[in-house]
Image: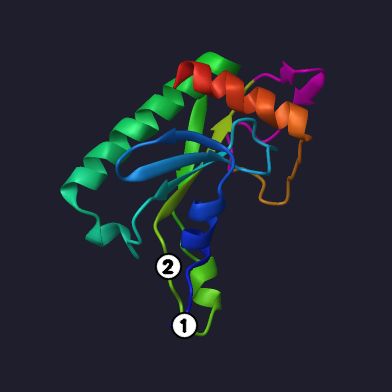
Amino acid sequence: MATCEICEVLQQSESRLLETKHWLVTLAEDQAYLGRVYVTARQHWSSLGILPAEAWLESQQVIGRYEEAVRQAFGADNVNWCCLLNNAFQASMPRPHVHWHGRPRYAEPVWLEGVKFTDPEHGHHYDRARHQLVDDGLRREIETTLREYL
């Protein structure tokens, strides 16, 4: 049986911001949208349609907590959410695993530790081609700041 890439990531994830019974919130490596996260099901559910009611309810609470945290921490205006599951279907034996991508959006630039984060597409679809990796020190600062509000 094919392995699940997401299940493997769950075991190794270093940037854990919030853990609940059903969900794990981790900071994404790409910070082109400051505070970008993954909200990942801790159990291997392959589609949104099979999530138990308890997991759905908890996901609403987790997403709400995160959205408020990123607003308080960095002044995000809103958060774009997507649950695509596309990459799993590039494999000959797909093993999709429910997870959400959260991209905070900003009307104004945000400065953090001397680094300027901008959102030139604010009010429009995010730009999939934009990438911004941050060094370990800045990554820890983003994590610490978000955790203060979670």
Q: Compared to 17, does 44 lie above or below? A: below
**Residue extending furthest toward the right:** 114
Local crowd size for mark 1, using a 10 Å CA cut-off: few (<14), some (14–19), many (≥20): few
| Residue placed most toward the observer, 78 or 111 | 111
Q: Secondary structure at mark 2?
A: loop
Label drawn at residue 82: none
Q: Compared to 44, does 108 lie above or below? A: above
Question: Would you name the residue on which mark 1 appears?
Answer: 93
| Residue 55 appears left or right of 148 | left
The amino acid on which the numbered mark 2 sits, given as a three-letter code, is Pro
Local crowd size for mark 2, using a 10 Å CA cut-off: few (<14), some (14–19), many (≥20): many
Q: Position of residue 106 (x, y in %)?
A: 61, 25
Residue at coordinates 77% horizontally, 18% vertically from top-left? Answer: 113
Q: Quadrant of residue 24?
A: top left
| Residue 125 appears left or right of 3 | right
Residue at coordinates 76% horizontally, 28% vertically from top-left? Answer: 137
Read off the magenta span. 108-125
| Residue 60 appears left or right of 93 | left
The reply to whether residue 115 is in sight is yes
Residue at coordinates 37% horizontally, 51% vertically from top-left? Answer: 42
